[in-house]
Amino acid sequence: MKKVLCLLLLLVSYFSFSQEEENIKSHEIKLNAFNAIIFKSIDFSYEYLIDSESSIGVSVFFNLHDSDDRSFDDDNGPIYNEEFALTPFYRHYFSNKYAWGFFLEAFGMYNVQKDFDGYYDGSIGQDVFRDGTSNNVALGISLGGKFVSKKGFAFEFLGGLGRNLSQSNDDIGTELVPRIAASLGYRF
């Protein structure tokens, strides 16, 4: 009788644990609202939750700022030098909840920067811009926090800095690259 009872308890606990594991949502998609509003750019992210403390993911950044509309006289707002960035990342979470709360992130970044420098040439009476791009590879770290509702709505903020380790054009490529986000998303 004791063996049957122990076996029954073991089976019940096994199936209970299995059902808990099946209910864990391990995928997230996010849109960086901060970059869309402030910098006129789109930054999408996908994150896969490995376990309760770690995840991996990738962000794709597209700058929508029209480089032909540049002028020193107009205040078009802040802009990124990056035209495109692909950023794989790894995160470690510091909370008792599943992939929730404050985290430390290590990231790599492939970015393409376009030169926005120029000067006013009085002899022709207009702004003159240098054309050129630089393909760069960077490594960096970020700190942030993520908060997820019971229905899967996610809010995340982060700030970080990376250093370009390899540049195709030293005259255009910057030494440091920012990683800033206030993202809205969904965990599924």
Image: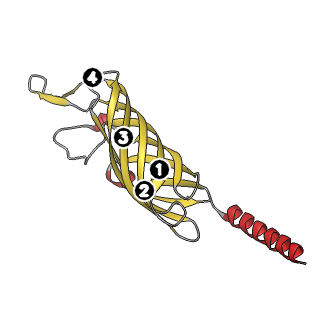
Task: Say which quarter of the image contains residue 122.
Answer: top left
Q: Earlier in the sequence, mark 4 or mark 2?
A: 2
Choose mark 4 or mark 3, whichever is in front.
Answer: 3
In the image, which disc is placed on residue 140? 3
Task: Give the amino acid type for the residue marked by disc 3 in the picture.
Answer: Gly
Q: Secondary structure at mark 4?
A: loop
Choose mark 4 or mark 2, whichever is in front.
Answer: 2
> Tags 2 and 1 in contact by the CB under 8 Å rule?
yes
Task: Give the amino acid type for the residue marked by disc 1 in the picture.
Answer: Arg
Find disc 1 in the rendering and name its residue.
Answer: 91
Q: Position of residue 160 (x, y in %)?
A: 33, 48
Find disc 2 in the rendering and name its residue.
Answer: 103
Residue at the far front in the pictured view: 2
In the displayed structure image, the side of residue 30 where residue 9 appears, left or right: right
In the image, which disc is placed on residue 52? none
Residue drawn at x 87%, y 72% as measured from the top left = 3
Find disc 4 in the rendering and name its residue.
Answer: 170
Task: Give the amino acid type for the residue marked by disc 4 in the picture.
Answer: Asp
Task: Give the amino acid type for the residue marked by disc 2 in the picture.
Answer: Phe
Residue 119 appearing in the image: yes
Give the CA separation, mark 1 to mark 3.
12 Å
> Tags 2 and 3 in contact by the CB under 8 Å rule?
no
- Label 4: few (<14), some (14–19) or many (≥20) C-alpha neighbours in 10 Å: few
- Label 3: few (<14), some (14–19) or many (≥20) C-alpha neighbours in 10 Å: some
Q: Position of residue 133 (x, y in %)?
A: 33, 25
Q: Earlier in the sequence, mark 1 or mark 3?
A: 1
Give the CA separation, mark 4 to mark 3.
19 Å
Task: Say which quarter of the image contains residue 65.
Answer: top left
